[in-house]
Amino acid sequence: MSWPALVGLVVVTLAVAGCTSPGATPRAGDGDASPAAPPGGTPRWRACPEAAEEIAGRRGPDMRYECARISVPRRWGDDGRAATAGPGSGETFEIALLRARSMKQRDRIGSLVVNPGGPGGSGVDTAVHLSLGAQFGGLPATVTERFDIVGFDPRGVSRSSPVECVSDAELDDSFGYDPDPESAAAFDGLVALNQRIGRSCGTRYGDQLPLYGTEQAARDMDAVRAAVGDEKLTYLGYSYGSLLGAVYAQLYPQRVRAFVFDGAVDPRQGVVAASESQARGFERAFDNFVRWCADHADRCPVAPDARAAVTSAIDRARVSPVRGADGREATSGWVFYAVVSSLYTEQGWQELARAVDRLADGDPADVFRLADAYTGRRPDGAYSNLFDANLAINCADEDEKPSRQRVRELQSRWRGTYPLFGPALAVGMLTCVEWPGRPDPYPTGRADGAPPILVVGTTGDPATPYEQTPALAGMLGVGRVLTWDGEGHTAYPQTACVTEAVDAYLVDLTVPREGLRCPAR
């Protein structure tokens, strides 16, 4: 799979988390080495063509790459200035930026700031991938020749003062764990794992944990706007990036030029509602895969009953996991995440069918390839800090903490309603249940004073189900819905209809007509 197939992260982490662009994410400390500009200062940009090579293995045609860093207050006050009291006051985070500028640029409009979702995805990586050109799934020349493409790693993510408190072994244990731990002992084992992770992060960051929430990151985004010299912000946010952008639009409605949210998150959903929404979305996408298999048996080796084949593969892995050539075991968790990974794009369906078929023959290589593309696990078993950041941000945002008993009840109930994904989404709530940090919830209201904001939804989206698209548009009060009758997570720039509508909006501020629907292909 390639960008933008694996863009965006699922809302609930570790039990079901998700994917961003598959480019390599440098370890903490890598990236731009120039000093960070102080809060409100002008960044010092330096040429960094090596960044594109490291992230994507290539550079975009006729593209120049520059990197910089800015400093932001660790804690912003409600007035948009550095807080003078409380945890983090007087201290700063460093935010990494990358700018891709076409050498064919003409009639420059400004910067298009991008975020891939997560939370925990790297905007620096995303800017590189989007700069590669349409032939590699990037942005069309219509956009790249009018805008600088600017990515930033949000606070706590990758190169921006990264959160690092979950070990590679703990991540392996989390992803490999039974997605539906039915026995009391198995459930308690997952609770204990999440408690260990919570203690580790609490010990390391203490009262700083709430500083990684979305509202603080949205205020950082206004510092990014100022750093690139734009009076008003033009923004493209995928998945969780829609939530980040929605919070910005509420805080700074007069500074919005054009915002595109692709794969919308409904900010008003609590953790239980959000988890059930995703269970419903993944189950619906899996049903679509099952129907595709039945209709395309020549391309689906697990036809005619793909659901039975996948369910049986997970059940067998619980008692007798297949061991790979390197000794790694394809436990039920890894098989489950291979399924999740494949549902992010319709092209992944055939890969899933092949992986399950080969697993039955004793070869888990394709299962691991799919699962590792999703989790970002490297061949040496190391991870980036994506899931450390995902935990810190999600749990800072969430002020609803269901009890363990409530989680257990939902696990049982959702097993009947969403048999493959319901239990995993239920137990996924344990991560924030066992989290030590105080919450810092973001605002959920209208963006009065902002211009129309384009909210793009895909009817077959598993991770941000389509129902959240009109919900977000309605909450903001200025949202305009664009629907893609397609499969997978996010839509732009995958089809001509969606691409033309979004491009016209970004470049000319032409808002698509109300109710516009784009065909699958």
Image (cartoon, rainbow, N blue to C red):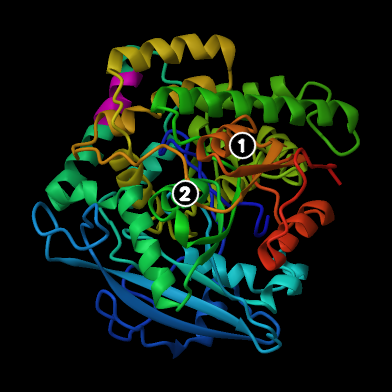
User: Could you tell me which residue is drawn at 65 percent across and 33 percent down?
Assistant: 466
Percent coordinates x, y for residue 27 in the rendering: 37, 68
User: Could you tell me which residue is drawn at 46 percent across and 38 percent down?
Assistant: 11
Range of the magenta residues? 186-193
Sequence-first disc among 1 and 2: 2
Please, is residue 115 above or below residue 362 in the view? below
Assign the magenta stretch its main secondary structure: helix
Mark 1 crowd level (few <14, some 14–19, many ≥20, 10 Å Cα): many
Q: Quadrant of residue 56?
A: bottom right
Percent coordinates x, y for residue 337 in the rendering: 54, 38
Percent coordinates x, y for residue 440 in the rendering: 26, 41
Please, is residue 407 above or below residue 299 in the view? above
Is 6 on the left or on the right of 383, as rendered? right
- Specify the quadrant that holds the N terminus: bottom right
Q: Quadrant of residue 461?
A: top right
Residue reaching furthest to the front? 449
Is 60 on the left or on the right of 98, as rendered? right
Residue 4 versus residue 358: which sits nearer the camera?
4
Q: Amino acid at mark 2?
A: Gly
Label 1 – label 2 distance at C-alpha: 17 Å
Is residue 383 shown to the viewer in this render? yes
Residue corresponding to mark 2: 118
Mark 2 crowd level (few <14, some 14–19, many ≥20, 10 Å Cα): many
Mark identifier at residue 355: none
Residue corresponding to mark 1: 469
User: Could you tell me which residue is drawn at 34 percent across and 58 percent down?
Assistant: 219
Q: Is residue 191 magenta?
A: yes
User: Could you tell me which residue is drawn at 75 percent across and 50 percent down?
Assistant: 512
Percent coordinates x, y for residue 207 in the rendering: 13, 47
Residue 44 versus residue 409: which sits nearer the camera?
44
Is residue 24 shown to the viewer in this render? no
Q: Is residue 521 magenta?
A: no
